[in-house]
Amino acid sequence: MKAIKKIGLAILLGSFVFSCAPSLKSNGNHGLPPGQVKKVTGAKSAKQYAPGQYKK
């Protein structure tokens, strides 16, 4: 009975640890800064790749 409680506790603690793991969100530029994306695409301005600078 003690072994079952220990296994259950280990599974519960493991689920808490893995559920709290952070997830990183990409900004759509594959992690590159706006200036580097500008170089890759050959654009004249990096403004369109900067966050908050999209045309409305």
Image: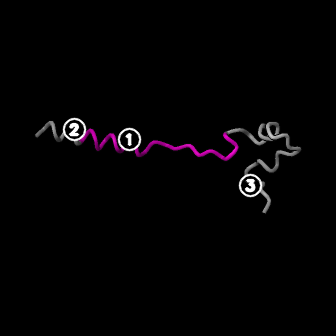
Q: Is 13 colored magenta in this rendering?
A: yes
How far apart marks 1 and 3 lie (CA) works out to 34 Å
Nearer to us in this view, 26 or 9: 26
- The amino acid on which the numbered mark 3 sits, given as a three-letter code, is Gly
Q: Which residue is drawn at 73% across and 51% down?
A: 51
Of the two numbered discs 2 and 1 on the same chain, state the one appearing first in sequence: 2
Of the two numbered discs 1 and 3 on the same chain, state the one appearing first in sequence: 1
Nearer to us in this view, 8 or 30: 30
Q: How crowded is mark 1: few (under 14 residues within 10 Å), some or many (20 or more)?
A: few
Q: Nearer the viewer, mark 2 or mark 1?
A: 2
Whether label 2 touches label 1, CB < 8 Å: no
Reading the image, the residue beneath label 2 is 7
Residue found at the very far front of the displayed protein: 41
Quadrant of the rendered structure where residue 34 is? top right
Q: How crowded is mark 2: few (under 14 residues within 10 Å), some or many (20 or more)?
A: few
Reading the image, the residue beneath label 1 is 17
Q: Residue at x 20, y 38 (%)?
A: 6
Reading the image, the residue beneath label 3 is 52
The local secondary structure at tag 1 comes to helix
What is the magenta range? 9-30
Q: How many marks?
A: 3
Where does the image place residue 15, in percent across and percent down from the top left? 34, 44
State the quadrant of the N terminus.
top left
Q: Residues within 10 Å of mark 3 (few under 14, many from 20)?
A: few
